[in-house]
Image (tube, helix red, strand yellow):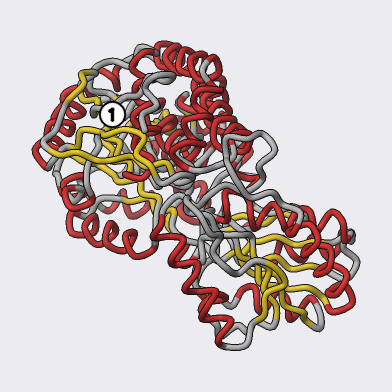
Amino acid sequence: MGYTTFMDLQLNSIIDNRDIEGPGRLASVNPAIEEEIASVSLLDRNGALLALEAADRAFSSWAATSVRERRRVLARWLEIMVSEEEELATLVSIENGKPVNEARLVDVAPGCATLSWWEANLERLLEGRRAVPDQLMFAHWKSGYRFDPLGVLSVITPWNYPVGIPMWELVPALAAGNTVVFKPASATILIGLRLAEMARRAGMPPGVLNAVALPGSASDVLLDDPRVAKVLFTGSVEIGRHVARRCAERIIPVQLELGGNDAAVVAADADIERTARGLVWGAFMNTGQSCASVERVFVERPAYEGLLDRITELTKGLKVGDPAQPDTDIGPMTTAEQREEVERQVEAALQQGARTQCGGKRIDGPGFYYPPTVLVDVSDEMEIMQEETFGPVMPIVPVEDIDEGIRRANASRFGLTASGWTQCTRKADRFQRELNAGAVTINEHGLTVCGEANACWGGVGESGIGRAHGEFGLHEVVNIKYVAQGPGNRNGEPWHYPYDEDLGRFLGAALPLLYQKGLRRYRGLGELLTTRHFRKRVRKSSLIRRIRQFF
């Protein structure tokens, strides 16, 4: 079934702003009906090398482009995305399976927010920062920090948020002056190519953003090529390990956003209605295909029965069906393989004694549908509590107190996000302090962090390395360069050769003055003033400006 009758689809890779065909074909499939949307031209390794060559060639000129010009491109890209948001959300719904309203909410809106925030803040973020030397012997130097682009970046993104995640990675990388080879996930290749096509129309210069439709078997070139300065990867832990190993071979940096097994800890005083609604959305939004989905819920026993009943009631009321319909809550899963993994984990838990409150069985008919599922009588030893499920499953466990809830929440090799649910300020502070994750939210789950362009995003443990979003995300895509400039006077600096007795006298008097406390620091001041090094090589005007440091 074709969709080109009502939607322009980008079916070729974009390299050097040109449409490039490859030797292979990739079928994009609608997960709601299991029919082909379109056939995309697939590159091979040679095509990827062509993209890397284009990015390398474009780097010097793009890095030298003014921040104002880069902002102009971002602003135009945002204008295009907003004007075409309905069509983009529809494409996300067709290829990824999200309900169309959800596609707008959690994919298109964050993409727009990212462009808007970087366009508004880019000059401030990239402006060099002055640093006053703490060391008094350097007081006459001018020093500070520059934020320079790294070079060619490989950006490899997954299929679960095919607009939001690429934009979080691409926009700061490009805004900072890097050039990019972008590999979207095969399952949502049309969406990834559409983003690059929008950037091309926005005025992105040739070679700056290159989008490649590339099979996994040919993707290692994006890790191994010596022109790649850094790799930004979002995906599974297994593939993330492979990426990290390849980058380690070349000793280049890598940013990894990997899996999650996110926990929610609910205090007895939590508002039942607010908590139930927040957890149901946090667990089942995007059919649970989020690295930050709620995958484990620990509830203090006094609140357990009431919360479980309300969560079950809300879950049973969710409408599963055609993602094109505005009143659909849950669409299909994006791939058949992921649905099979969810089925396997749920069945294993049931065989070990878990019970379903609702869901738990595949929905008959076409489409990769799986119903939202609430599990009880689960134990921490079950795979569904240990591994990332990446599907619409919420296990709920009673605990005796918050201590037990936090301890069990932290007993995971993952640590992407976590949430605490309480009406008590003291308990909220404790959740924020003690839950071990890259982001902790109170009375909502961490998925909301994704929509805030100024919030950093990343995990601890096997959830990844590095941070995306906002100012801390900028630090991942630039060389934070310390720069210092001396006066260039012909007398040289106090530490320059030759070493002699006078230098020994100078240092013997200077070190106490610089670092000793109390009146003893001044005991060698007279000796210092008589040394040749002080008379000829120390700028007295700089010391006078910093005179307070001596008292």
The one of 324 and 181 positioned closer to us in this rendering: 324
Q: Nearer the viewer, residue 436 or 19?
A: 19
19 relative position to 274: left or right? left
Q: Name the residue carrying label 1.
A: 179
In the image, residue 214 sits, relative to residue 432, either above or below, namely above
Number of numbered callouts drawn = 1
Instruction: Give the residue furthest to the bottom.
Output: 352
Task: Give SS at disc 1.
Answer: strand
In this rendering, the answer to whether 114 lies above or below 423 is: above
Residue 280 pos. (x, y %): 72, 56
Q: Residues within 10 Å of mark 1 (few under 14, many from 20)?
A: many
Q: Quadrant of residue 113?
A: top right
Residue farthest toward the front in the current orientation of the protein:
365
Q: Is residue 484 visible?
A: no
Query: Which image quadrant is residue 26 in?
Result: top left
Q: Residue at x 36, y 22 (%)?
A: 4
Q: Is residue 188 above or below residue 73?
A: below
Which x, y percent locates residue 258?
43, 58
Q: Is residue 380 left or right of residue 312?
A: left
Identified by mark 1, the residue type is Thr
> Residue 431 location in percent, x, y?
74, 64
Q: Name the residue located 51 percent from the left edge and 42 percent from the top edge.
A: 472
Nearer the observer, 446 or 310:
310
In the rendered image, the quadrant that contains the N terminus is top left
- Residue 441 visible to an observer of this rendering: yes
Horizontal side, residue 257 vs residue 98: left or right: left
Residue appearing at x 21%, y 58% in the figure: 246
Which residue is located at x 36 percent, y 13 percent?
A: 201
**Residue 281 locus on image (x, y percent):** 70, 52
Q: Is residue 248 above or below residue 286?
A: below
